Amino acid sequence: MAKVTVDASTCVGCGLCEQNCPEVFEMKDDGLAHVKAQDCSNCNLKDVAEQCPVNAISVS
Ligand code: SF4
């Protein structure tokens, strides 16, 4: 299973990852993206990570 993390010190809270994959990413009150699941049957998480404008998402 993938290991997905968001670097809170890098994330700028644009919300794109949540738009791309709400199963895995969730915007919280702190204005940052949080990981709520490690897997998504609908998305390629590496693609979602690549679209992050500040490269805050890592998928290993
Ligand atoms: S796409 Fe990147 S910068 Fe935008 S909310 Fe997600 S982790 Fe943060």
Image (cartoon, rainbow, N blue to C red):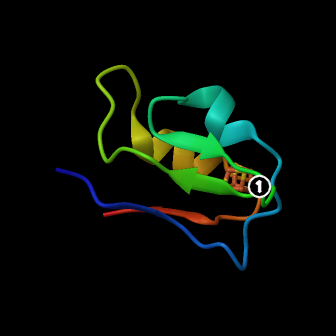
- Residue extending farthest top: 42
Q: Give the left or right position of residue 47, taking residue 51 as reference.
A: left
Check disc 1: other Cα within 10 Å, few if <14, some if 14-19, many if 20+.
few
Query: At label 1, which amino acid type do we have?
Result: Pro
Q: Give the left or right position of residue 56, taking residue 59 as reference.
A: right
The total number of labels drawn is: 1
Give how far across and how far down residue 15 sits, in percent: 76, 41
SS type, badge 1: loop
Q: Is residue 16 above or below residue 38?
A: above
Q: Quadrant of residue 18?
A: top right
Residue at which label 1 appears: 53
- Residue extending farthest front: 29
- Residue extending farthest bottom: 9
Which residue does the image show at 39% across and 34% down from the upper left? 44
Q: Is residue 14 above or below residue 60?
A: above
Q: Give the left or right position of residue 58, taking residue 11 as reference.
A: left
Which residue does the image show at 37% across and 20% down from the upper left? 42
Give how far across and how far down residue 57 sits, in percent: 55, 61
Which residue does the image show at 81% across and 54% down from the upper left? 13
Q: Quadrant of residue 26?
A: top right
Give how far across and how far down residue 41 sits, in percent: 29, 23
Q: Indicate yes or no: mark 1 CB to ligand 1 under 8 Å.
A: yes
Give how far across and how far down residue 8 sits, in percent: 66, 73
Which residue does the image show at 54% across and 42% down from the upper left? 25
Q: Nearer the viewer, residue 35 or 28?
A: 28
